[in-house]
Image (cartoon, grey):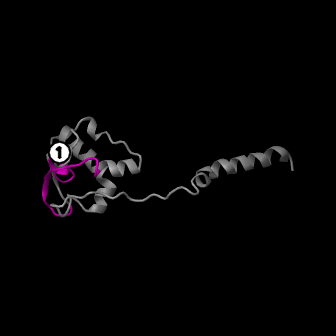
Amino acid sequence: MYHANKIIPGLVIFGLLMTFPFWFNIGSAAYSTPELVLPEDHEFCVESVEYMRAEHMSMLNEWRDAYVRDGYGEYQSMLTGQMYPMSLTKTCMNCHNNKEEFCDRCHASVSVDPYCWDCHIEPQGVE
């Protein structure tokens, strides 16, 4: 075998680098879904829970663009058919009024730092 003294160590180093994320995380705790404090006086969101978990950021971006750029102000729910204002403040924060107990728990667990609060005022929670 030509250059075996270079190829075999190169393959070993390549294998170690490619598998590093797997063996580095051996023994670390598995991800667990954070416990959220849900509103008591509302039974459902503008869309289903599964949809909101997967698509809420896309929905908020679409709302922002539709409201600011195109002038649309209402959203029709696919779940109920009801119309809602396209507003983080007037719609979302009516139910999720405590940022620490709702937004921050999920975003911190997945290491996401949303920029919503660069423009919007943080909800302080119900006192």
User: Residue 101: where, in percent of width, then height?
Assistant: 28, 51
Circle 1 residue: 89
Q: Is residue 74 left or right of residue 17?
A: left
Q: Residue at x 16, y 64 (%)?
A: 80
Q: Residue 96: say if magenta.
A: yes
User: Residue 33: where, in percent of width, then height?
Assistant: 38, 59
User: Residue 78: where, in percent of width, then height?
Assistant: 21, 61
Q: Is residue 82 left or right of residue 22?
A: left
For disc 1, the neighbor class at 10 Å (few under 14, some 14 to 19, many from 20) is: some
Q: Farthest top residue?
A: 118
Say which amino acid is labelled 1: Thr
Q: Farthest right residue?
A: 1
Q: Residue 4: say if magenta.
A: no
Range shown magenta? 78-102
Q: Residue at x 18, y 61 (%)?
A: 40
Q: Farthest front residue?
A: 127
For the residue labelled by badge 1, is the local secondary structure a helix, a strand or a loop?
Answer: helix
Q: Nearer the viewer, residue 36 or 75?
A: 36
Q: How many marks?
A: 1
Q: Residue at x 33, y 59 (%)?
A: 35
User: Residue 126: where, in percent of width, then height?
Assistant: 17, 49
